[in-house]
């Protein structure tokens, strides 16, 4: 969207535009036959905005809605002109013109304010105008109270009113009104401004002194409908913010004092205009309110219920729902109902107010009504604000990131029309290219080259090298538009809370074009390619978002890396906005490097792609895609064939096998035996159990491994036994240290390993003989940071298989919520990833949960082998833990407190809430109940309970379904069994 005038040089002109728009409600009562001054202001503003906008505005979503209403109006007039006797066609055409002006005004103003982030400006100007009109109204009222004739001589002449319009129903009660609005209408207008300030999504700080003044002005109108509506607004605001409101004692005191003083000073006015009026309405003496809601329906003709009676054939009734139904029938009413329902889903407070206003102000042909529609749809949008000046973007903050292949010299940036900084990553896949420079600098460009493959690796390499505020992803077949960088700067500054923008490209399919400005969400993110994406570099790096190296050209699966990238952005809470602006075009001559037609591999890879981010409704997604897209194969594949291929793609994705390997054609061009596994075993007085542990490792079917055992100051013959194993096996390394704890022993083991992957094994556990073979194949094929398997739980009653099923897209969430029970030996860890982390040697309890929470929080890729490959021995552990120690409760609190303050674990607010508002409470509660079961005396438990009482009884704000219910029951049980017992 381009503007025809320079905003910096025309700020006064822009302010004049917003002022004229803001004054529309003030003039909507000044009628001149068929139209009023509000209508003229709308027409003037619309013409001005049409001159400002260029032609690209046509075709956007909001404009389409306006055109839909106009088409409904035209059809209505044509129908009645043909089939309704005596219908005034000229009047119908005039109404079409009027409704066209109204609807286009709403659409254009919406696009201008939304596209240029003018929400706060718009609300600020409207509030100031409302205050100014209130001051005028109070001044007129004061003049009347003191018997001045100035209003009669000056104001009433121009406002076409008399003194009667300032008094209440023939009494001497002076009611406040403004220049162009009688009291009840003026009260509605002020209520609308108050509601927008209280329930808007704008991030402009609420000025409560302004709102207090506007509320007083509504009260001084002594309009029953206005005051009742104000009470409704304040009640809804209280419901929405009741927790914060009740904490503000000062505000409660001020409001109470104000209401008491108001009741004393204006007791007579309150009684006559509110209490007495309510009584006569309720007893049926005053039927005006009932008529507004119910009486208006009598004008609806049952014989014309579909098309209505036609424009202008309904009196100016109050009930707008009845008004629309009478004039336009069910067709017109359905249109308005859809808009109201859509807005209600986004901001039900404001939309409720709008429905209330519809019963207070008659006539959808009134400019006031359309102005209220504009305000509602504007302020049901999400918040947009610059959170700090660091978000402001300039042209020098932009870097274009270009992926290319098989270039010997740096590509010609000038021919790509790029004037800003650029980084090029060149992947050499052609075996004939043997000589190339790893880095070439030229002007504002630098090109890095390496023998590598995969678009995901290329994009990730570029992102890691970029230090600019804004990154623009590009391919080497893109030619950028003139001044594209100005467009990028303008839009990032207009959408300061947007982390990612998705632009348009020329000569791309029309179905992929953005027709307007809108937010991209989980329902529409799958249609955008990477070479149209720009993002705030810090936002992406902070959330550790990267491109999947399994999908896209040169990868295991042929496409979809851009879809996964956008999905990961949404999962991380980043805001993505689609914009209709074009920044580049594609060269037609370049064929796709990966697309080979709609063949078996295409659908197989689609199945794998959907499996990567679709968890809950995957089956429905596969069925719908098969039904819709099977035709693309031009009859070669049936819908059933496509569904089977996609399903096989999903199955293959869990083990990251390619299309070829899945169908037993070939695996990969590597031997997994080339990867060495290091097994780290800490041991302390483990003579009785460690022999079985070592035998299970030495008997593996996979042979490329080493065992590093760290004796942690054992006092039995454990060390002597270990030296015997080392003498008999060259791949067994034995280290010893003073008794510093299991964390220290594991860290020492890490420092002395040489493998590519690491397994931590406890000295009383064993692993199945195919453990390493299964885990290393998954690790190498998926290039995962972590591979996790299931386990067998060995107890005195036998062996129980425990399968780790992850329900969440974030395994850390399942781990922290006890949805999965992961043991230390269930993890195989990539060495390069492990090097970033170490066990906390200051912890003597919970060190494994703390450590693996860090790994799960930071792992780029996690894959699973859903087979029980570990034997977790609880028989030995039960013997060790038979003497319960209350010290464990303090240690539990210690490590959980460390976790909640560790930025390497707390990547988002949800994780923090799980730990602080669920896991910590649950840990302490269950440990105290365990202490009771182990026979710890009641007084000791009571002392520990009181120590952590504030934490245990804290409100559980994170909802974990049945686990939350279970925890609530456990807390009640703890108090009943432990605390009450102690009190007795």
Image (cartoon, helix red, strand yellow):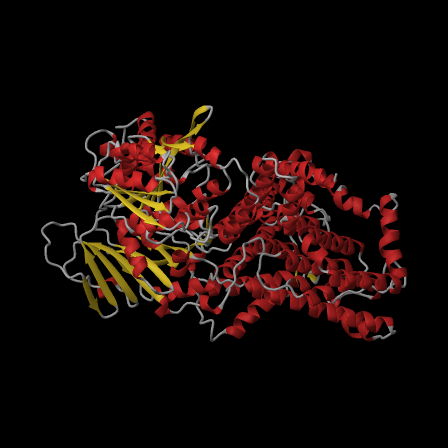
* Residue 674 location (% of width, % of height): 19, 41
* Residue 106 location (% of width, % of height): 56, 56
Taking the spot 47% from the left edge, 62% from the top edge, the residue there is 496
Seen from the viewer's position, the closer of residues 660 and 480 is 660
Seen from the viewer's position, the closer of residues 474 and 439 is 439
Q: Is residue 844 left or right of residue 169?
A: left
Q: Is residue 604 left or right of residue 521?
A: left
Residue 653 drawn above or below residue 541: above
Residue 361 shows up from this direction: no
Q: Is residue 741 left or right of residue 588?
A: right
On-image quarter of the N terminus: bottom left
On-image quarter of the C terminus: top right
Seen from the viewer's position, the closer of residues 727 and 276 is 727
Residue 485 shows up from this direction: yes
Seen from the viewer's position, the closer of residues 270 and 810 is 810
- The mark total stands at 0
Q: Quadrant of residue 464?
A: bottom left
Taking the spot 15% from the left edge, 61% from the top edge, the residue there is 437
* Residue 153 location (% of width, % of height): 80, 74
* Residue 599 location (% of width, % of height): 25, 34
């Amino acid at each position: 969207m381009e503007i025809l005038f320079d905003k910096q040089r025309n700020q006064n002109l822009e302010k004049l535009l917003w002022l004229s728009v803001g004054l529309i409600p003030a003039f909507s009562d000044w009628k001149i036959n068929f139209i009023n001054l509000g209508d003229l202001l709308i027409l003037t503003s619309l013409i001005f905005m049409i001159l400002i906008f260029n032609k690209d505005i046509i075709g956007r979503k909001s404009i389409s809605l306006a055109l839909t209403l106009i088409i409904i109006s035209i059809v209505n007039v044509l129908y009645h002109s043909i089939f309704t006797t005596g219908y005034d066609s000229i009047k119908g055409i005039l109404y079409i013109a009027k409704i066209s002006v109204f609807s286009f005004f709403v659409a254009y103003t919406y696009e201008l304010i939304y596209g240029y982030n003018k929400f706060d400006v718009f609300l600020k100007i409207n509030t100031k105008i409302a205050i100014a009109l209130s001051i005028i109204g109070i001044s007129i009222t004061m003049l009347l109270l003191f018997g001045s004739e100035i209003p009669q001589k000056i104001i009433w002449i121009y406002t076409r009113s008399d003194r009667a319009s300032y008094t209440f129903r023939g009494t001497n009660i002076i009611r406040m009104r403004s220049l162009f609005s009688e009291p009840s209408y003026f009260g509605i207008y002020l209520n609308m401004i108050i509601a927008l300030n209280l329930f808007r999504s704008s991030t402009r700080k609420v000025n409560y002194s302004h709102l207090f003044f506007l509320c007083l002005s509504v009260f001084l109108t002594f309009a029953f409908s206005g005051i009742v509506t104000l009470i409704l607004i304040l009640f809804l605001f209280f419901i929405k913010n009741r927790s914060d409101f009740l904490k503000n004692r000062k505000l409660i005191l001020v409001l109470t004092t104000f209401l008491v003083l108001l009741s004393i000073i204006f007791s007579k006015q309150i009684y006559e205009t509110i209490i007495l009026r309510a009584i006569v309405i309720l007893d049926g003496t005053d039927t005006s309110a009932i008529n507004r809601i119910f009486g208006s329906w009598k004008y609806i003709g049952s014989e014309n219920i579909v098309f209505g009676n036609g424009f202008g054939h309904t009196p100016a009734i109050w009930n707008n729902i009845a008004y629309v139904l009478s004039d336009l029938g069910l067709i017109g009413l359905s249109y308005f109902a859809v808009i109201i329902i859509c807005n209600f889903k986004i901001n039900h407070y404001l939309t409720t107010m709008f429905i209330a206003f519809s019963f207070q102000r008659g006539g959808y042909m009134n400019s006031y009504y359309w102005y209220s529609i504009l305000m509602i749809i504007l302020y049901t949008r999400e918040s947009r604000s610059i959170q700090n000046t660091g978000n402001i973007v300039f042209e020098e903050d932009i870097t274009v990131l270009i992926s290319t292949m098989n270039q010997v010299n740096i590509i010609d940036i000038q021919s790509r029309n790029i004037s800003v900084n650029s980084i090029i990553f060149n992947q050499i896949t052609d075996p004939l290219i043997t000589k190339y420079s790893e880095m070439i600098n030229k002007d504002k460009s630098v090109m890095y080259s390496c023998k590598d493959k995969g678009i995901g690796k290329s994009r990730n390499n570029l992102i890691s090298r970029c230090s600019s505020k804004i990154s623009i992803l590009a391919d080497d077949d893109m030619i950028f538009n003139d001044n594209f960088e100005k467009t990028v700067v303008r839009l990032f500054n207009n959408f300061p809370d947007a982390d990612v923008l998705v632009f348009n490209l020329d000569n791309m399919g029309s179905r992929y074009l953005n027709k307007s400005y809108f937010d991209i969400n989980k329902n529409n993110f799958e249609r955008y390619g990477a070479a149209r994406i720009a993002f705030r570099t810090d936002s992406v790096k902070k959330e550790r978002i990267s491109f999947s190296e399994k999908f896209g050209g040169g990868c295991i699966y042929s496409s979809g890396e851009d879809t996964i990238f956008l999905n990961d952005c949404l999962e991380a809470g980043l805001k993505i906005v689609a914009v209709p602006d074009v920044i580049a075009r594609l060269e037609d001559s370049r064929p796709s490097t990966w697309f080979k037609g709609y063949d078996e591999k295409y659908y197989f890879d689609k199945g794998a792609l959907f499996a990567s981010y679709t968890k809950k409704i995957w089956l429905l997604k596969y069925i719908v895609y098969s039904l819709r897209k099977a035709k693309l194969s031009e009859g070669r594949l049936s819908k059933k064939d496509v569904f089977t291929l996609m399903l096989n793609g999903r199955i293959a994705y869990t083990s990251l096998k390619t299309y070829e390997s899945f169908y037993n054609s070939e695996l990969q061009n590597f031997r997994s035996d080339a990867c060495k596994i290091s097994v780290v075993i800490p041991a302390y007085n483990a003579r009785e159990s460690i022999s079985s542990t070592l035998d299970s490792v030495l008997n593996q079917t996979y042979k490329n491994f080493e065992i590093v055992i760290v004796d942690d100051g054992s006092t039995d013959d454990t060390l002597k036994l270990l030296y015997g194993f080392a003498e008999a096996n060259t791949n067994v390394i034995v280290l010893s240290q003073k008794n510093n704890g299991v964390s220290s022993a594991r860290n020492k083991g890490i420092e002395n390993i040489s493998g590519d992957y690491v397994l931590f094994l406890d000295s009383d556990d064993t692993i199945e003989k195919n453990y390493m073979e299964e885990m290393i194949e998954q690790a190498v094929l998926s290039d995962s940071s972590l591979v996790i398997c299931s386990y067998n739980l060995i107890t005195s009653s036998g062996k129980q298989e425990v399968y780790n099923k992850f329900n969440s897209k974030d395994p850390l969430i399942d781990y922290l919520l006890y949805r999965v029970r992961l043991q230390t030996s269930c993890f195989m860890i990539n060495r390069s990833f492990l090097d970033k982390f170490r066990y906390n040697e200051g912890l003597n309890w919970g060190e494994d949960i703390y450590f693996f929470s860090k790994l799960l929080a930071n792992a780029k890729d996690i894959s699973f082998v859903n087979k029980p490959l570990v034997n977790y021995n609880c028989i030995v552990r039960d013997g060790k833990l038979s003497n319960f120690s209350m010290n464990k409760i303090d240690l539990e609190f210690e490590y959980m407190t460390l976790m909640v303050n560790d930025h390497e674990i707390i990547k988002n607010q949800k994780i923090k809430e799980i730990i602080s508002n669920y896991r910590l409470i649950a840990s302490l509660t269950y440990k105290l109940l365990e202490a009771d079961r182990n026979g710890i005396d009641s007084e000791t438990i009571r002392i520990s309970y009181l120590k952590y009482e504030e934490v245990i009884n804290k409100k559980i704000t994170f909802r974990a379904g049945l686990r939350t219910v279970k925890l609530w029951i456990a807390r009640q049980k703890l108090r009943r069994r432990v605390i009450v017992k102690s009190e007795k």
